[in-house]
Image (cartoon, grey):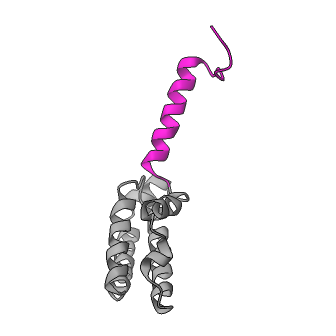
């Protein structure tokens, strides 16, 4: 089975992923209100950068739920978990995911290397 088929056209995998997602969101709904609010804001932010099928993003999503459940169970305020720079926290979460910004960086560097013939910038014309 090709990776493309497995990621984009595998109906059983997609249905299972949807069931799993609904189950995870039920866990989010059980969190305290401030955790729910921050989770949903982070989730919205993260999905703007998701590339490909998004399955790697789902792993981050699930790990974040576990982190928030642990923090809530220990009586911590949500910002004790994320810090005040929630956008920076998101950046750290996204380091392990394939994102569109990664694709843009690769494209930019490739186009410059192609145009300049792989020169390193220390050379002068």
Instruction: List x then y, in percent, for residue 47.
Output: 36, 60
* Residue 123 magenta: yes
Residue 107 against residue 86 in the figure, above or below = above
Q: Is residue 92 visible?
A: yes
Q: Quadrant of the C terminus?
A: top right
33 or 59, nearer to the observer? 33
Residue 121 against residue 56 in the figure, above or below = above
Instruction: List x then y, in percent, for residue 24.
Output: 39, 80
Residue 35 against residue 106 in the figure, above or below = below
Q: Is residue 22 visible?
A: no
| Residue at 54% over, 32% down | 109
Q: Image quarter for residue 13?
A: bottom left
> Which region shows up in magenta?
98-125
- Residue at the far front in the pictured view: 84
| Residue at 46% over, 52% down | 99
114 or 68, nearer to the observer? 68
């Amino acid at each position: 089975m090709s990776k493309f088929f497995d990621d984009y056209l595998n109906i059983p995998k997609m249905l299972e992923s949807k069931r799993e997602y609904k189950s995870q969101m039920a866990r989010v709904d059980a969190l305290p209100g401030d955790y729910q609010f921050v989770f949903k804001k982070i989730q919205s932010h993260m999905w703007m950068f998701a590339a490909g099928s998004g399955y790697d993003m789902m792993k981050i999503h699930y790990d974040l739920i576990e982190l928030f459940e642990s923090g809530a169970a220990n009586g911590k305020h949500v910002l004790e978990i994320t810090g005040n720079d929630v956008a920076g926290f998101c950046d750290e979460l996204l380091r392990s995911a394939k994102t569109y910004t990664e694709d843009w960086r690769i494209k930019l560097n490739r186009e410059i290397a192609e145009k300049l013939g792989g020169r390193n910038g220390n050379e002068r014309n």
